[in-house]
Amino acid sequence: MSDGGMADYERIDFSKISFLVVEPNRLMGQMVRDVLMTLDAQYIDRARDFESAVTLLRMGRIDVMITEWVLSDEKLGRTGMDIVHWVRNDAQSPNRMMPILMMTANSEEEYVCRARDCGVSEFVAKPYTVNGFYTRLAAAIARPRQFVRIDAYFGPDRRRRRDADYDGPERRAALDIG
């Protein structure tokens, strides 16, 4: 994909990255797959619900997950947020620090904050542009935020930037997830 607006350091060899797209709507899932293929992605698995996503994740071959918030089995209590929680907190998760993009048409602050507080790496609001999608994906892969564990939270540091005026104790420390 060539775009003069994209920084060189954000150019990523997507052909070496395996993706899992969790989207219950076939057409929307195909659209995400098409965008990834435009970026030269070669390995793209798809799931439509929580159980099939976890089955694929347990195989341990997924590098990046892109999930819709609302899943077809939401009435059973399983959403994209449940998958994020499973990846970040379950002992059987093979990659607790994988980049995770949350996609949803619900882009109100409440949803963004809930996704952030669950441990997503980036949030993509639908409808999205290819460049907007790429920007979030590249940020999650090329510039991942440090992971932290605070009380019940494990995931990327929710603070996007350091505050130069902050005068309190430094609480960002290296994390040993061993």
Image (cartoon, rainbow, N blue to C red):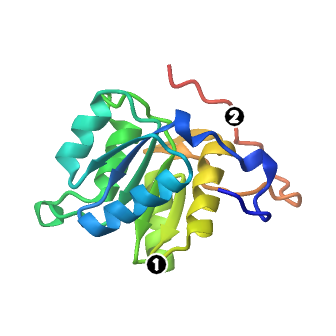
In this rendering, the answer to whether 163 lies above or below 42 is below
Tag in front: 2 or 1: 1
Left or right, residue 116 beside residue 1: left
Left or right, residue 131 beside residue 27: right
Where disc 2 sits, the SS reads loop
The residue drawn where x is 47% and y is 80% is 108
The residue singled out by tag 1 in the image is 127
Query: How would you rate the neighbour count of disc 1 (Cα within 10 Å): few for under 14, some for 14-19, many for 20 or more?
Result: few
- Label 2 vs 1, first from the N-terminus: 1
Q: Position of residue 87 (x, y in %)?
A: 37, 40
CA gap, disc 2 to disc 1?
36 Å
Q: Quadrant of the N terminus?
A: bottom right
Q: Amino acid at mark 2?
A: Ala
Residue at the farthest right position: 164
**Residue 55 placement: quadrant:** top left
Where disc 1 sits, the SS reads loop
User: Which dot marks residue 173?
Assistant: 2
The residue drawn where x is 40% and y is 78% is 106
